[in-house]
Image (spheres, helix red, strand yellow):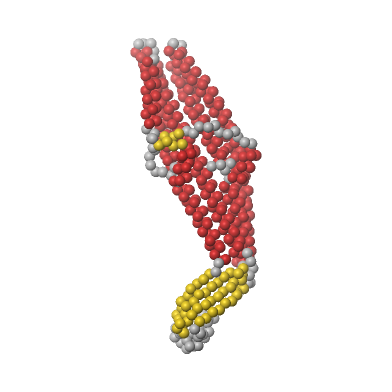
Amino acid sequence: MNRIAFLFLLLSTNLSVFADQKGGNHLSLSDARARALANHPRISAAELKALAAQSVISQARAPFFPFVNANLTKVESFTENTRIAAGGMNNPVIFDRVAVGVAINQLITDFGRTFHQLEGSKLRSRAEAEATRGARNLLLLQVSTNFYAVLQQQELVQVALKTLATRKAVLEQVSELASNQLRSELDVSFARINSQEAELLLAKSENDLKSAQLGLIAMLGLRGDWDYELVEETGSPEELAPMETLISRAFDHRPELTRLRLEVDAARHTASAEKALSRPSVTAFASVGNIPVRDERLPHNYAAAGVNVSVPVFAGGLNSARRSEAEIKVRITESNLRDEENLIIRDLKIAYQNVTFSKKKYALQQELLKHARNSSSLAQSRYELGSSSILELGQSQLNQTAAEIAFVVSRYDYLLHRAILDFHQGEP
């Protein structure tokens, strides 16, 4: 039994070394999420798309302001007869001149077309902002998933180390008994197989831990090696609210739904703008300038102003086709919104069931682990007394290892499903 105590002391030392090798940078879940939001390129891309959408608002608003052009013109006529030219109607008289001036065009009204285009661009800009919020929420969920995966694999590595130490202790004990001809070599062989299986379990657990660490580093938007020590935040999750409350929260807070509602409104404004294509547009224009070099028949200065009313008469069906396309797109976005609402209700119900089941499973696995440990302890005592075989001992140790692994997995499954449920409610 002194060897067993020594092996457990060695195990605790290895666990301390293992913890020290994880790095000195303590990282909690809230810290990981903050770093991911600051570093991940997916968030930068989403924010830039929202910024580009804001520029579209200025583009749509531009027709409400005067268009001012400064002109410098030099004209030299090479023929006396300039009244006739090929290629269509043209200016009947051309004079030699050099002129400078300013031309101003101002939209007076197009009966709502520009207004609806501006309102639609504002709504699309807000929709892009909601898309950015959705990208943030999804990234935070992925960070939580990878964070819990690392914590889970760390505990599984500790389970594997404990299992290996226990089975090596049994192998030492059986080997010593066999050397004194109190146990057969068959027992030694079975004990060695159990020890080697524990070594395989440890190797797999360590490999899975490294993979989980790399996944978390990627979610943080970094490219370096693992240099963190995870800090698990304490605190029990809140009790689940009724399903009706969860659905109401999701409909109020999910950025995907808000984005689609804004897109529906934007599509309606676009349809209204396309309808306005059949209405007149009224534009005022003015021109003023100076002619320093001119024909003697031209005045020294010039100024003119006018109003133009443009009435669409025939465009080959273009305007009606654009109006029809815009109205169809309104119906498409409305259908997408209803579909997203149905999917969110489905996802919420599934997440709710998973949380309920994982909570129950965690409690059952905790009870199962307690019985598995008692069974293994009894099997160890029976084997030492010679009342049972090595097969019974090995099976009890296998059951205990499986129960410990299942207990760790069920614990983090519950935390993961809670994070997924929060995500489906629209909570980051």
Q: Quadrant of the rendered structure where residue 17 is?
A: top left
Residue at figure coordinates x 50%, y 42% from the top left: 140
Image position, residue 344 (x, y; %): 60, 43
Is 354 left or right of 151, judged from the image as shown? right
Query: Does residue 325 appear in this view?
Result: no
Image position, residue 168 (x, y; %): 38, 21
Q: Quadrant of the rendered structure where residue 63 is?
A: bottom right
| The N terminus sits in image quarter | top left
Query: Does residue 46 appear in this view?
Result: yes
| Towards the viewer: 418 or 314 | 418
Image position, residue 200 (x, y; %): 40, 28
| The C terminus sits in image quarter | top right
Residue at figure coordinates x 57%, y 43% from the top left: 426
Q: Is residue 298 above or below residue 361?
A: below
Residue at figure coordinates x 40%, y 16% from the top left: 187
Q: Quadrant of the rendered structure where residue 318 is?
A: bottom right
Question: How many numbered marks are there?
Answer: 0
| Towards the viewer: 406 or 66 | 66
- Considering every residue shown, the one lying at the far left of the view is 179
Is 337 left or right of 9, judged from the image as shown? right
Residue at figure coordinates x 38%, y 27% from the top left: 16
Image position, residue 207 (x, y; %): 40, 34
Q: Is residue 167 above or below residue 235?
A: above
